[in-house]
């Protein structure tokens, strides 16, 4: 999806910025604001750091008892396997036990806090580590920058709404006393609550009468419950590839229904990796006798249908009087996927984008938000921002991009990152990081079952290590 950042980088006027100083808020010209950050995952942590660096007063609300957000694994699953019952007890994480990163650790880390192996015996030294290693990295980041003192753990935001004088009323509820809501006023709210909790489900004709088990990958943890069963898995993205291979170890058969651009990967898997996986087009319907009918006319008698179909953006706490809406997974209107023009800079979102290199992008977004709130970085007028949003939406329509792909940045992510960096007056994404990301994508397509342990980009690994050597140990210590 082409957004046009590359073209605009070469033609746009210099950004509205005075100069870049990490501690610039000490100068009285800039404003210090009281900011509420919702969520202490990767996005919330780096947002808190950048806001504090800019001189703002920060409170981070985290409903769990530790940092890490979606990277905190739990074997617990929800009582509703589809995750569609609004009254269910919500489990935040969607991690499965076997999950390893699908990106090398060199590219994953924050820009000044490399994600390198610590060498400690309890840590995962692999280049594509398991989920626990990422969780520990985020904990190290929080400790290294003294962020824990900003976080209220086991505290859920139940309401955030605009009041007079462009202030925000935030109501929170502590897990220790759910009967009491604490109400506070902030100058700004930064939403960092993630988007891997509220499942999106495929529409399947006949599913209400189908006798088999019906679930979403949000509630998948281990393959053992699928032993000797016939499983139909819907989806073609990273989690679908991983989970299909995971389940195929114990299942009688795994049938993958996909219309994804990643179907080539799935075809390679079903053809080469194992002998009990088959690739199909999407499901046309299911029947009362347990059969699943695909659009090519093939039929399978299945025990389980597993949706690996992604998630919904969900902000049940947020009240903008209809200014910000979620329409078919388009959160908008948002200028550059961050600011609602009519509420900027008081309300912002970090981490909505997908098919991207997330942690560095969160960092660029957070730096821009922090600078905009202090007044160090100027934003366009409301009218100019709305015109930009409208032009973006028109470009999606012209390219027949589905509305629910609005926040899929695909091949434009580094142009977007570099645009943000230019606005902030800082260097953009390192060239080795861009090349390594692309090399990994190519390797993943060529050998989807082996790319995490076999690669050919050692030259880029050396460039990364040289870059990391110029950082202080893990970049920490500069609050």
Image (tube, grey):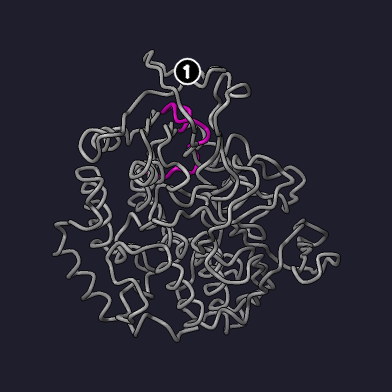
Question: Can residue 4 be seen at all in this image of the molecule?
Answer: no
Question: Can residue 434 be seen at all in this image of the molecule?
Answer: yes
Q: In the rendered image of this protein, does residue 309 appear above or below residue 345?
A: above
Residue, disc 1: 284
Q: Quadrant of residue 452?
A: bottom left
Q: In the rendered image of this protein, does residue 192 appear above or below residue 323?
A: below
Range of magenta residues: 396-410
Q: Residue at x 57, y 83 (%)?
A: 27
124 within the magenta span: no
Q: Is residue 54 left or right of residue 161?
A: left
Q: Residue at x 21, y 76 (%)?
A: 466
Query: Which secondary structure, mark 1?
Result: strand
Image coordinates of residue 369 in percent, x first then y, are 55, 63
Q: In the rendered image of this protein, does residue 106 appear above or below residue 397?
A: below
Q: In the rendered image of this protein, does residue 386 appear above or below residue 167?
A: above
Image coordinates of residue 14 in percent, x first then y, are 41, 60
Q: Nearer the viewer, residue 28 or 50?
A: 50
Q: Is residue 19 left or right of residue 32?
A: left
């Amino acid at each position: 999806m082409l957004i046009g950042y590359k073209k605009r980088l070469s033609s746009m006027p210099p950004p509205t910025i005075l100069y870049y100083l990490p501690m610039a808020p000490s100068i009285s010209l800039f404003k210090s604001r009281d900011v509420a950050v919702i969520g202490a995952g990767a996005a919330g942590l780096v947002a808190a750091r950048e806001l504090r660096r800019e001189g703002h007063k920060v409170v981070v609300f985290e409903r769990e008892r530790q940092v890490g957000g979606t990277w905190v694994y739990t074997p617990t699953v929800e009582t509703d396997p589809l995750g569609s019952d609004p009254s269910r007890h919500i489990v935040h994480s969607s991690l499965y036990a076997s999950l390893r990163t699908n990106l090398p650790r060199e590219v994953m880390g924050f820009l000044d806090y490399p994600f390198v192996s610590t060498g400690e015996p309890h840590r995962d030294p692999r280049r594509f580590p398991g989920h626990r290693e990422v969780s520990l990295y985020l904990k190290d980041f929080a400790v290294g920058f003294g962020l824990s003192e900003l976080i209220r753990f086991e505290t859920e935001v139940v309401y955030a709404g605009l009041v007079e004088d462009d202030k925000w009323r935030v109501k929170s509820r502590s897990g220790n006393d759910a009967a009491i809501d604490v109400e506070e006023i902030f100058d700004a709210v930064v939403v960092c609550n993630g988007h891997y909790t509220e499942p999106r489900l495929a529409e399947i004709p006949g599913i209400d009468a189908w006798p088999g088990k019906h679930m979403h990958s949000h509630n998948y943890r281990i393959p053992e419950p699928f032993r000797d069963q016939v499983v139909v898995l819907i989806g073609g993205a990273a989690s679908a590839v991983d989970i299909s291979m995971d389940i195929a170890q114990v299942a009688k058969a795994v049938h993958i229904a996909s219309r994804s651009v990643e179907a080539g990967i799935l075809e390679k898997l079903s053809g080469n990796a194992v002998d009990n996986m088959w690739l199909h087009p999407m499901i046309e319907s299911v029947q009362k006798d347990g059969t699943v009918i695909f659009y090519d006319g093939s039929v399978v008698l299945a025990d389980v249908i597993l949706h690996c179909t992604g998630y919904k953006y969900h902000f049940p706490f947020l009240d903008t009087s209809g200014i910000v809406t979620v329409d078919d997974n388009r959160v908008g209107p948002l200028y550059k996927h961050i600011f609602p023009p009519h509420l900027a800079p008081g309300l912002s979102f970090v981490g909505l984008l997908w098919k991207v290199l997330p942690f560095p992008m969160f960092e660029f977004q957070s730096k821009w938000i922090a600078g905009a709130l202090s007044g160090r970085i100027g934003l366009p007028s409301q009218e100019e921002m709305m015109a930009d949003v409208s032009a973006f939406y028109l470009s999606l329509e012209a390219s027949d991009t589905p509305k629910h792909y609005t926040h899929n940045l695909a091949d434009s992510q580094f142009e977007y990152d570099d645009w943000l960096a230019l606005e902030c007056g800082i260097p953009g994404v390192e060239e080795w990081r861009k090349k390594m990301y692309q090399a990994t994508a190519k390797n993943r397509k060529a050998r989807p079952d082996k790319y995490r342990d076999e690669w050919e980009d050692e030259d880029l690994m050396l460039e990364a290590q040289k870059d990391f050597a110029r950082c202080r140990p893990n970049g920490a210590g500069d609050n």
